[in-house]
Image (cartoon, helix red, strand yellow):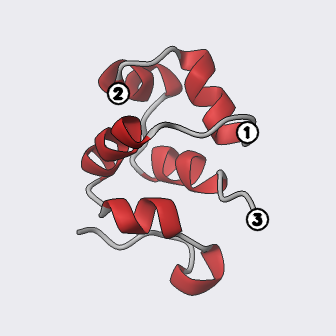
Amino acid sequence: MERKFYIYLSLRKLHQLTQEEVSERVGVSRQALAKWENGETMPDIEKCVLLAELYNVTLDDLVNYTKDELGLSVPPK
């Protein structure tokens, strides 16, 4: 199964937020966020909920997103 880590970086850049801003809002270190964006690790479900709320997307779109299906952006909820 293909890792879909690029969604975390894409949404952060789309919302013009820094890693520091996002990590503070979801309660993780900047290093943890960087690992999500690089595909080294994945956020747990609680952090996914917070990310979905922050970026105003559905949890389903956040975790099931594919670039081919949805284009460059994830639709707002």
Mark earlier in primary sequence (1, 3): 3
The secondary element bearing badge 3 is classed as: loop
Other-residue count near label 3 (Cα within 10 Å), few / some / many at <14 / 14–19 / ≥20: few
Contact (Cβ within 8 Å) of mark 1 with mark 3:
no
- Residue 59 relative to residue 12: left or right: left
Q: Amino acid at mark 2?
A: Val
| Amino acid type of the residue tagged 1 in the rendering | Asn
Mark 2 residue crowding within 10 angstroms, few (<14) / some (14–19) / many (20+) = some
Asked whether the residues under the numbered discs 3 and 2 touch, taking CB atoms below 8 Å apart as contact, a structural biologist would say: no
- The extreme bottom residue here reads 69
Residue 56, position in %: x, y? 26, 56
Q: Which residue is mark 2?
A: 26
| Residue 9 at x, y percent in the picture | 58, 46
- The residue where tag 3 is placed is 2
Report the side of 46 relative to 65 (left or right): left
Q: Amino acid at mark 3?
A: Glu
Residue 70 percent coordinates (x, y)? 51, 81
| Residue that label 1 marks | 38
N-terminal of the pair, mark 1 or mark 2, is 2
